[in-house]
Image (cartoon, rainbow, N blue to C red):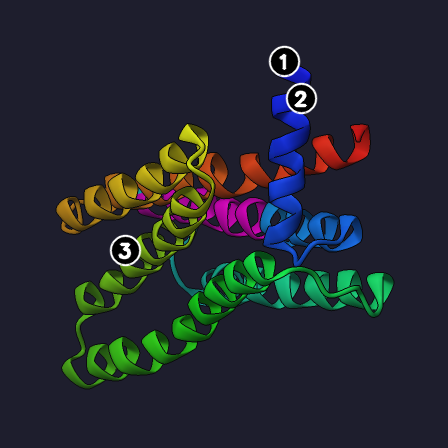
Amino acid sequence: MATDSLNDDLAFLRTLAEGSEDNLRMFAEIYFAAGAIYGGEMLLHIGQVLGWLPPAGLFGLAAGLAPTAIFILVVVAIALRKGTTAQGNLVGKSIGAVFGAIGLSNFALIAVIGSVAWREHSFMTWQIYPCIVFVLQGTGWFVAFRLRQRAWLGLLAAGWFVIGIAMALSIQWMPGFVALAALGLFGFMALPGYLMLRRTAGA
């Protein structure tokens, strides 16, 4: 029974990547990479706010820009290696569209919140951005939970929501804010991505 349930979950996870085993692995690789890379960035920021690492200068600039540059290179490398992938069923396309919309919304949020933060010279305003990104990730997994009715998907969604709200509540305490962000990225992005990779490898 447990094996059947795991295989059933794996079949559902394939729909996250539009029904293909290769697409599921690509989704998992990107999700794991995002969690690991940006979680690592948060660890660097923790070192900065605690005074262990320089907050400004060349290191500060690299800590802010290098993770995104690395992530883009990783995504391009994964996409080039995978090539064209098969399309899947309507459920898979729907969930894929949700996560695609979330990704696109991130760029709009950068423009909206970033422009206000820049104009008001308010770093705290900019800190709202990652809180919203976490809530949007929770929204994507909540859609998956509603379609599949699996408790672990609901817990994953709830985790994103809780971390996003907790970050907002700790927005004036930078060490806690960054630590929560690291916890969310490692626990609800890198770890699920890794587990999906393990499942596809063992399927």
Q: Is residue 115 visible?
A: yes
Quadrant housing residue 93: bottom right
| Left or right of 76, for residue 59 | left
Q: Are marks 1 and 3 in contact (CB under 8 Å)?
A: no
Is-magenta flag for residue 38? yes
Residue denoted by label 2: 4
Residue found 46% across the figure and 34% down from its top: 187
Mark 2 crowdedness (10 Å alpha carbons): few <14, some 14-19, many ≥20: few
Quarter of the picture holding the N terminus: top right
Give the magenta range.
Answer: 34-49
User: What residue appears at the point 40 percent right and 52 percent down from the top-left corner?
Assistant: 143
Q: Earlier in the sequence, mark 3 or mark 2?
A: 2
Query: Between tags 1 and 3, which lies in front?
Result: 1
Residue 110 picture quarter: bottom left
What crowding class fits label 1: few (fewer than 14 Cα within 10 Å), some (14-19), or many (20 or more)? few
Placement of 98 over or under 197, stated as above or below: below
Residue holding disc 3: 131
Label 3 close to label 2 by CB (< 8 Å): no
Residue drawn 14% across and 81% down?
120
Please state the horizontal and vertical placement of residue 47, each as a whole percent of the image.
Answer: 41, 42
Neighbourhood count class around disc 3 (C-alpha, 10 Å): few under 14, some 14–19, many 20 upward: many
List the residue tagged with mark 1: 1
